[in-house]
Image (cartoon, rainbow, N blue to C red):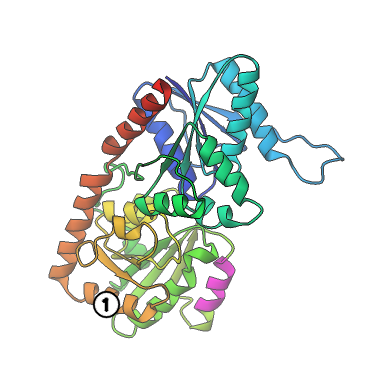
Amino acid sequence: MKIGITCYPTYGGSGVVATELGLALASRGYQVHFISYAIPHRLTHFVENVYFHEVEMASYPLFEHSLYALSLTSKMVEVIEYEKLDLIHVHYAIPHAVSAWLAKQIRKKAGKDIKFITTLHGTDITLMGLEPSFMPLVKFSIEESDGVTAVSRFLKEKTLTNFNTNKEIEVIYNFIDIEKYRPFQEKPFREKIAIHGEKVLIHTSNFRVVKRVPDTIRILQKVKKEIPAKLVLVGDGPDRSECERLARELDLQKDVIFLGKQDALPEILNAADIFLMPSQSESFGLSALEAMACGIPVVSTSVGGLPELIIHNETGYIAEIGDIDRMAKYVIELLTNEKKYAIFSKNSRERAVKYFDKNLIVPKYIEYYQKILNN
């Protein structure tokens, strides 16, 4: 089978999942063609059966803005025709599903067909998709997709409700490479940041407002009143400057470590004791799963798909949005009770292995591909 995958090549979860799925499919002998404006950031080296097709952006004085959706359509049509693709799998509805639908119509006009699957990841439904100017387009692209998947039950229900559609949506959870994300015996990075044996809190995200990254700094402030602690922030985005300002304002600049975008996540996660996810919206929580696979308990908000991933009082704790006091209390409770922490750490790793191992989830995508192709 030859599969085209389109995703955003950036640091967000949808691009990560799409890239890891493509790599997993390639390792099983499928031919995978990534189609995007830049190479996905996790495609760091040559992999057999993986090909990248860059979407060229036309520059013409008449066009004030770039026509990415149309350029993407043209590239899709080209790759479908010359690489003989069996299927297009787009991640994130806007504008990828629309471009795939246009490519499908062009192929139909030529007397040929291509089926496409849309995977919904979250903000394409809960944020961008609810913009009045986008709603009809998102609804149309969902209903015209040959198949639709969502990364959590929450996102499936949200889609059906928000867009008043009866489209059949398959829930296929995000997944993890449990061999890559695992507890390490040696933790050299921890020794560099927790010089005096401090406890380490960690958060990774794209620093958008919806992630509420400043809350992690306020949680650290409260935890430090009881326990010596550091906070490691991984990633970059619109809220980073605000977070740096807040750390200085609270006189925590020496205790909050900004690492920026990083690829060596397993090594960094293994330096931590607790993963913080205070988001106001989270359709699944891939970064929390990465932490759990490393045996790191998660303290998060009770939003979206997080309760499907994190089991309260077993693998971590869940609190209401903005309840910094409770989240800090949960962190302190775990960090001052070695026995409970060990149980939560073990439970976190076991849950990741039992339910979210890529060897369990990737076959579900393959099965779904076959189902759509056979319809």
Q: What residue appears at the point 54 percent right and 43 percent down from the top-left corner?
A: 93
Rendered image quadrant of residue 347: bottom left
| Residue situated in front as seen by the camera: 62 or 248 | 62
| Residue situated in front as seen by the camera: 92 or 371 | 371
Q: What residue appears at the point 68 percent right and 39 percent down from the top-left corner?
A: 68
Q: Position of residue 246 (x, y in %)?
A: 53, 78
Looking at this view, name the residue that lies furthest to the left: 339
| Residue situated in front as seen by the camera: 165 or 36 | 165
Q: Position of residue 152 (x, y in %)?
A: 36, 50
The prevailing secondary structure element of the residues shown in magenta is helix
Q: What residue appears at the point 47 percent right and 28 percent down from the top-left corner?
A: 46
Residue type, mark 1 in image: Ile
Looking at this view, name the residue that lies furthest to the right: 61
Q: Look at the numbered disc 1 and give the secondary structure of its residue.
A: helix
Above or below residue 371? Residue 185 is below
Q: Is residue 179 magenta?
A: no
Q: Is residue 270 visible?
A: no
Q: Which residue is mark 1?
A: 332
Above or below residue 337? Residue 211 is above
Left or right relative to 57: residue 147: left
Q: Which residues are magenta?
A: 239-247
Above or below residue 56? Residue 165 is below
| Residue situated in front as seen by the camera: 20 or 71 | 71
**Quadrant of the drawing holding the N terminus:** top left
Rendered image quadrant of residue 323: bottom left
Q: Position of residue 59 (x, y in %)?
A: 79, 37
Q: What residue appears at the point 52 percent right and 62 percent down from the top-left corner?
A: 207
Q: Residues within 10 Å of mark 1 (few under 14, many from 20)?
A: some
Q: Is residue 141 visible?
A: yes
Q: Position of residue 280 (x, y in %)?
A: 45, 66
